[in-house]
Image (cartoon, rainbow, N blue to C red):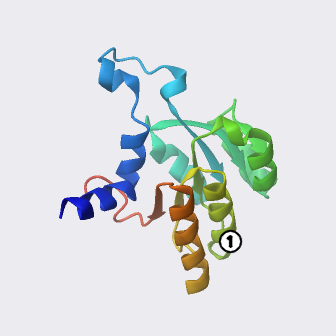
Amino acid sequence: MAAALNATKRWSARGLFDRLQARKVIAGSGETPPSDSVCFAVVGVGGQGRGDIRGLGDLGRVVAVADVDPRSIAETKQLLPDVRTFGDYREMYDKVGRSFDAVLVATPDHCHALPTVEAMQLGKHVYTEKPLARTVWEVRKLVEAARAHDVVTQMGNQGHSFASH
């Protein structure tokens, strides 16, 4: 039973924050040093992506965003004036991949799998909006990547992605 609970915790969103727990909790200082803050990149910053950014609250900070629509980038810059922006998530991964710990994927439904698997291949933890993928094959590849790269993943389902559920 304990092994099952540990496995569940390992692959849950809560597990991400347990694994990236800040020193302020351990040391009791109350201040989080920048090196202990979870840094996020967001792929897809249209309506759902911007809503997810707002939902991050104090869980960390968004350091980079990518979207093919310049209007979505412009609206996100109003929300996060200092964020790095890219028109292609692959360029973001290449140029600033070392500056973030986790990726939030909120692209249109048919293109969630590629940015998700590529983030996992970089060793990044990933929260992906539903649907996770288009096919069972894509889902199997995502599971393989998560296990191979030992990352925490979660598929977003707004009714059940919060601590209250």
- Residue at image position (19%, 59%) is 2
Name the residue beneath numbered marker 1. 111
Determine whether 55 is above or below 142 in the image: above
Q: Percent position (x, y) of residue 44? A: 67, 57
Q: Percent position (x, y) of residue 19? A: 41, 42
Three-letter amino acid code of the residue under disc 1: Cys
Task: Name the element at disc 1.
Answer: helix
- Residue at image position (47%, 43%) is 56
Which picture quadrant has residue 133?
Answer: bottom right
Res 44 seen here: no
Q: Percent position (x, y) of residue 8? A: 31, 61
Determine whether 61 is above or below 102 in the image: above
Q: Percent position (x, y) of residue 88? A: 80, 55
Determine whether 109 is above or below 38 in the image: below
Toward the top, the furthest residue is 29
Toward the left, the furthest residue is 1
